[in-house]
Structure formats: structure tokens, C-alpha cells
């Protein structure tokens, strides 16, 4: 067996361990920063989707509130008319895009579950309303 007792051939183990630890720490820090940045990006996307849903709901509510007095008057007229009158329906224009946008942009997985459930239920109600309006107009 050969012996290597020459001090010039000894490896500086302490220095190598410190450098290795610094490299590992640097990589972990970079991964952590990247994860944090991605989380912020995902959260910003979810926040934008929530704002879009809220805006659409406010707009739809305003449209329904505008159409409601007409429909109440129409019901009163229908209830008191003999013989029945021919009437034209003027439904509220309800938008139904925000939920689809949230889904297609990938924002939904980053939203809170109760909000996703509520938005999905609202979207279904809006879809049913649009279907009913289409049926009436046909």
C-alpha cells in the first residue's frame, strides 16, 4: 500500500465542506425564492379572477334590477288581462364569462374552495337563466 504523507497532497476537507455547504445553501435559497415568486404570480392570477367575478356579478345584478320593474308590471298585466295579451319579453342581459376566464387561465386552483363553490353555483344559475331566456325568445 502506498502512503501519502506528503502535506502538499492532503485535501483541505474543512474548506471543501464549507464550500459544499455554501453551494447547497445557495441552491436551496434559489429554489425557495423561485417558489415564493411563483406563489405570488399564482396568487395575483387568482386575485384578478376574483375581481373579475365580482365585477361580473355586480354588473349582472344591476341588469337584473333594471329589468325587474318591467317584469313585475308585465306579470300584473298578464294576471288582469282578459283575453290574454301578446307581450314581448325584455330580459336582463346577463354576462357569463368571468368563471370561464378563471378556468381557462388556470386561476381556479389558487382560489379558496368556498369561493370556487360559490362562483360555480352562480355560473350555473346564470347559465340556466340564459337558457330560459333563449327558450322564451324562440
Image (cartoon, rainbow, N blue to C red):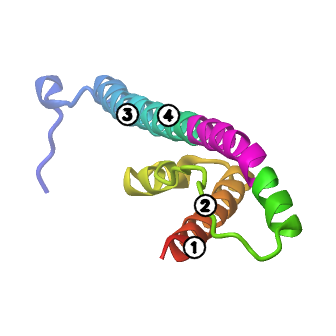
- Per the image, the residue denoted by label 4 is 48
Percent position (x, y) of residue 136?
57, 73
Front residue of 61 and 25: 61
Q: Are marks 1 and 2 in contact (CB under 8 Å)?
A: yes
- Per the image, the residue denoted by label 2 is 89
Q: Secondary structure at mark 3?
A: helix
Q: CA distance from mark 2 to mark 3?
A: 55 Å
Q: Secondary structure at mark 4?
A: helix
Q: Secondary structure at mark 2?
A: loop
Instruction: Tell me the quarter of the picture where residue 8 sits.
Output: top left
Q: Which residues are magenta?
A: 54-71
Percent position (x, y) of residue 58?
65, 36
Q: Residue at x 49, y 48 (%)?
A: 98
Q: CA distance from mark 1 to mark 4?
A: 35 Å
Secondary structure mostly seen in magenta is: helix
Instruction: Tell me the quarter of the picture where residue 69 sits.
Output: top right
Hey, which residue is sitting farthest front in the picture?
A: 83
Q: CA distance from mark 3 to mark 4?
A: 21 Å
- Per the image, the residue denoted by label 3 is 34
User: In front of the other: label 1 or label 4?
Assistant: 1
* Mark 2 / mark 3, whichever is N-terminal: 3
Label 3 neighbour load within 10 Å: few <14, some 14-19, many 20+: few
* Mark 4 / mark 2, whichever is N-terminal: 4
Q: Residue at x 86, y 58 (%)?
A: 76
Q: CA distance from mark 1 to mark 2?
A: 8 Å
Q: Secondary structure at mark 1?
A: helix
Residue 55 falls inside the magenta stretch: yes
- Per the image, the residue denoted by label 1 is 136
Q: CA distance from mark 1 to mark 3?
A: 53 Å
* Mark 1 / mark 4, whichever is N-terminal: 4
Amino acid at each position: 500500500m502506498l502512503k501519502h504523507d506528503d502535506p502538499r497532497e492532503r485535501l483541505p476537507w474543512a474548506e471543501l465542506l464549507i464550500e459544499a455547504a455554501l453551494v447547497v445553501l445557495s441552491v436551496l435559497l434559489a429554489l425557495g425564492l423561485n417558489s415564493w415568486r411563483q406563489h405570488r404570480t399564482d396568487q395575483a392570477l387568482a386575485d384578478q379572477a376574483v375581481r373579475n367575478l365580482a365585477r361580473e356579478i355586480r354588473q349582472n345584478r344591476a341588469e337584473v334590477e333594471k329589468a325587474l320593474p318591467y317584469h313585475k308590471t308585465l306579470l300584473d298585466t298578464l294576471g288582469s288581462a282578459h283575453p290574454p295579451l301578446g307581450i314581448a319579453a325584455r330580459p336582463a342581459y346577463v354576462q357569463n364569462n368571468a368563471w370561464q376566464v378563471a378556468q381557462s387561465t388556470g386561476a381556479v386552483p389558487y382560489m379558496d374552495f368556498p369561493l370556487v363553490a360559490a362562483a360555480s353555483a352562480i355560473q350555473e344559475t346564470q347559465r340556466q337563466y340564459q337558457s330560459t331566456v333563449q327558450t322564451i325568445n324562440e
